């Protein structure tokens, strides 16, 4: 107890990493146990690492043999994926992907779709496994109709880690109705366009940490329904930024905690987006954010004009805490660091902005906009009801706004019409922080 208190006094709380989770996450059976039980090497099922032969059928056969306990192993090498794989009904299984899988087919859908699977791990033991989606081949023609790279549906007790997902023709990684998952040590690098989401999660009890995303849409975003989501050590390195939404009818999101989120050259640092709709978002904590060069910073917009209006008075936002935000926004007169634009028909309640210090990179003042939002801090009004609208002009930089940058900030976008190189997994995702779990490559060698 004394030990814990002293850690807390130092401002460190590593032992409380699970704050917003409802229980343990990750596979229930260790990898070694699965590997000792059975290993299904795709090379024994007809795969050829020649970047030409379709590896899809070999992955499916290996999965069928090992899905009831064992490891599907894709050794180092270059593979072409011409036909998409749906991996269904696994139990106590893993996919160890040390090779690079190149998209070779052109159908829509999901290149890799895992569903109805429990006690599952997908990872690269060398931290070098990757999927190259070569989405630019679609994007240069103005098409977003190609496949997503990875989708999970009703997967429980799982982890996905130490993989790079690159240049998806569409979304990179979605988790739909999953439970007890952990996603970490990932690099996602897509084209500079909307519609190329990094990680989208609508699930229960999921921990996403130590992830880098480059694209121009969702970095790590929570959709409805979701609860008990913890997202930390996130590097949005030229992205759209992290968000919640878009939210529509019967929204049900609660207990979401983001912390240590570094956002560079993105659309926003955090956005909650809706236009009409119904239901609730409650108990959200957005803590330790650093931003530089972003358009918006905190952007709660329940009258979001880029979205068509959905029937309903608006999604009720309640108990939203924004704490310790530092850095700079690109132009605070155009898009100030605080925008809390709640629905007139469902004013936000119990919104708290604390230790919020950001300043503009251009010009000498910045704006704060609060509409129909109640709580404390910034331009928020105390109370609980009624509609109002206020814009405050701030002419003095707040003390303590300056914040570190990441040395590796991307200097220019990747564009959408040429190949995007496969990155290595970074060794830091937030200034001064190393990954919570060692990279697999490092853990294996020592
Ligand atoms: C997930 O793991 C927990 C803890 O081991 C277990 O109680 C639960 O049944 C598992 N979930 C499923 C769907 O098997
Ligand atoms: C408000 O949300 C925080 C998490 O951000 C949670 O710890 C707290 O219990 C919530 N308060 C209420 C009244 O539910
Ligand atoms: C940010 O993106 C740029 C371009 O891909 C890359 O050079 C840099 O290493 C990235 N940062 C990190 C920490 O990976």
Image (tube, rainbow, N blue to C red):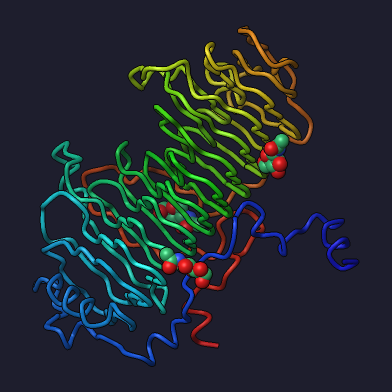
On the rendered structure, is 83 left or right of 361?
Answer: left
235 or 43, which is in the foreground? 43
Quarter in which the N terminus is drawn: bottom right
Q: Position of residue 302 (x, y in %)?
A: 49, 21
| Total number of numbered discs in the rendering | 0
Please tell me which residue is depicted at 24% across the width and 61% down the height of the picture: 112
Near-viewer residue (325 or 349): 349
Q: In this rendering, would 63 be left or right of 28?
A: left
Q: Examine the image and state in which quarter residue 153 appears.
A: bottom left
- From this view, report whether residue 392 is shown above or below residue 352: above
Toward the bottom, the furthest residue is 36
Q: Residue at x 40, y 46 (%)?
A: 200
**Position of residue 109 measured from the top left corner of the image (x, y, whole percent):** 18, 50
The x, y position of residue 380, in whole percent, is: 69, 18
Where is residue 283 shown, x and y percent of the image? 63, 38
- Residue 4, picture quadrant: bottom right
| Figure check: 35 above or below 218 | below
Q: Is residue 182 above or below residue 296?
A: below
Q: Is residue 64 visible?
A: yes
Query: Would you say residue 157 is visible in this rendering?
Result: no
Q: Is residue 45 above or below residue 104?
A: below
Q: Quadrant of the C terminus?
A: bottom right
User: Which residue is at a point 33% across and 49% down the rendered structure image?
Assistant: 190
Quadrant hosting ligand 3: bottom left
């Amino acid at each position: 107890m004394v030990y814990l208190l002293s850690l807390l006094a130092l401002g460190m709380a590593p032992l409380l990493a699970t704050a917003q989770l409802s229980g343990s996450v990750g596979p229930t059976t260790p990898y070694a146990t699965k590997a000792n039980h059975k290993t299904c090497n795709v090379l024994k099922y007809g795969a050829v690492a020649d970047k030409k032969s379709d590896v899809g059928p070999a992955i499916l056969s290996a999965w069928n043999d090992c899905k009831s306990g064992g490891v599907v192993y894709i050794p180092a090498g270059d593979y072409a994926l011409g036909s998409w794989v749906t991996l269904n009904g696994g139990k106590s299984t893993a996919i160890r992907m040390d090779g690079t899988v190149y998209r070779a087919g052109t159908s829509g859908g999901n290149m890799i779709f895992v569903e109805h699977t429990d006690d599952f791990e997908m990872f690269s033991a060398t931290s070098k496994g990757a999927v190259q989606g070569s989405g630019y081949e679609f994007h240069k023609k103005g098409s977003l109709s190609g496949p997503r790279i990875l989708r999970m549906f009703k997967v429980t007790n799982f982890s996905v880690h130490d993989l790079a997902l690159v240049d998806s023709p569409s979304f990179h990684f979605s988790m739909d109705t999953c439970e007890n998952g952990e996603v970490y040590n990932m690099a996602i690098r897509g084209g500079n366009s909307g519609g190329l989401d990094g990680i989208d999660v609508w699930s229960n009890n999921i921990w996403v940490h130590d992830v880098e995303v480059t694209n121009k849409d969702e970095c790590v975003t929570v959709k409805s329904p979701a609860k008990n989501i913890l997202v930390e050590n996130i590097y949005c390195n030229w992205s759209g930024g992290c968000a919640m939404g878009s939210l529509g009818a019967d929204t049900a999101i609660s207990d979401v905690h983001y912390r240590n989120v570094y956002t560079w050259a993105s659309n926003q640092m955090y956005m909650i987006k809706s236009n009409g709709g119904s239901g609730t978002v409650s108990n959200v904590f957005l803590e330790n954010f650093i931003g530089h060069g972003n358009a918006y910073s905190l952007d709660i917009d329940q009258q979001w004009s880029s979205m068509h209006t959905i029937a309903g008075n608006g999604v009720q936002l309640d108990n939203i805490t924004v704490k310790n935000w530092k850095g700079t926004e690109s132009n605070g007169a155009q898009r100030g660091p605080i925008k809390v634009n709640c629905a007139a028909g469902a004013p936000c309640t119990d919104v708290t902005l604390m230790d919020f210090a950001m300043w503009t990179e251009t010009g000498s003042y910045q704006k704060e906009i609060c509409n129909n939002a109640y709580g404390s801090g910034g331009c928020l009004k105390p109370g609980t009801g009624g509609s109002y609208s206020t814009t405050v002009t701030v002419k003095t930089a707040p003390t303590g706004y300056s914040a570190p940058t990441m040395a590796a900030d991307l200097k220019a976008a990747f564009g959408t019409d040429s190949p995007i190189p496969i990155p290595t997994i970074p060794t830091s995702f937030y200034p001064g922080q190393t990954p919570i779990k060692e990279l697999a490559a490092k853990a294996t060698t020592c």
